[in-house]
Image: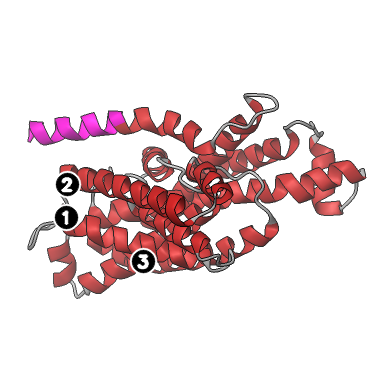
Amino acid sequence: MFLKFIALVAFTILIMLINLCLGDLTVAPLEALQAVFAHSGSGEIHDVIVGIRLPRLLTAFVVGLALATSGYLLQALSRNDLADPYLTGVSSGAAVGVACAMLLKFDFQTIPLFAFAGGITASFFVASIARGSGQYGVSVAKLLLAGIALSSVAGALITLAMTTFGTQLMAQGLYLWLLGGISGRNWQELIPTVCYTSVGLIIAFAAAKQLNLLALGEETASSLGLNVGRCQLVILAAAVLLASSAVALSGMVGFVGLVAPHLSRRLFGRGVRLQLVCSGLTGAILVLFSDLLARTLSPGQELPLGTLMALIGGPFFIYLLSYSLDQVQSH
């Protein structure tokens, strides 16, 4: 297990180094590291590495980490392996909040708060539908259908708001943002997101013991003295804060919170604290790899990050859905 974890960390560092080196201007690994840590190298290389690629690399890392950890928390909270910020409508609710903040012309430091408000509203809506009164756990079908319906309504609201109240330039920018991508992200946008993400991660790790108790079932956890309702609310808030921070920075990047926790569980087991770390790193690797493909597959043209993640995560989701339905029918 320890060797697997070391290999995961090493692979994360390797993919980060590759992202630093590859692009329209190919840079040797040693030159890239010198530009980052020793502030040496030619002016062009230093400007490209420190001014463009490093903030983009760290943005991809934070977005992947946040979405994957959020997905793991939602799956643990609902005891449903198909839960994910994108599929449950949390990302769509956050997107509505971001669109409102853009229309009201708030600065980027406050945009994640609007995204959080939209995401938490969406999560309560989906949870109220997917879980009937007095029912423990959630219905897979209701969860997915409610998430799909909410995503459709959110998309319609964003389009309506932008065409009615926004300028053409703002509408075009929002459309590109909805496709998902981290091109052009800078330090001023990254730092607030790191702060919000750090709060979500701290809450998640602090609630690891409570997550272990919830895994036993709500009735059992309650009999052991856990305040189930308050605990679920705190964990949900952490999951939504993580997802909303990522959406505010990168737009709609789907399936990271679905794929990463599943891969991590297969490789590292189900320990909560270990899964929080390993799921986050796996999500970071997925987004870093997808962003590398987005920049290098088509020279002179960048592909949308959200599109690439959909190509990776969509088939994986179909497989999980068919497997879950087979399990339900067998019982």
Q: Which residue is mark 1?
A: 129
Which circle's residue, 1 or 3, is located before the other in the chain?
1
According to the image, what is the colour scheme of the structure? Answer: secondary structure
Please, is residue 301 above or below residue 112 in the view?
above
Residue 36 picture location, percent across and down: 79, 50
- Residue placed farthest to the right in the image? 42
Q: Disc 2 marks which amino acid?
A: Lys
Q: Disc 3 marks which amino acid?
A: Ala
Residue 189 picture location, percent across and down: 63, 59
The local crowd at label 1, few if under 14, some if 14 to 19, many if 20 or more residues have their Cα within 10 Å, is: some
Q: Which residue is mark 3?
A: 237
What residue span does the magenta drawing correspond to?
318-331
Horizontal side, residue 186 vs residue 33: left or right: left
Distance, label 1 to label 2, CA atoms, is 7 Å
Distance, label 1 to label 3, CA atoms, is 18 Å
Figure label count: 3
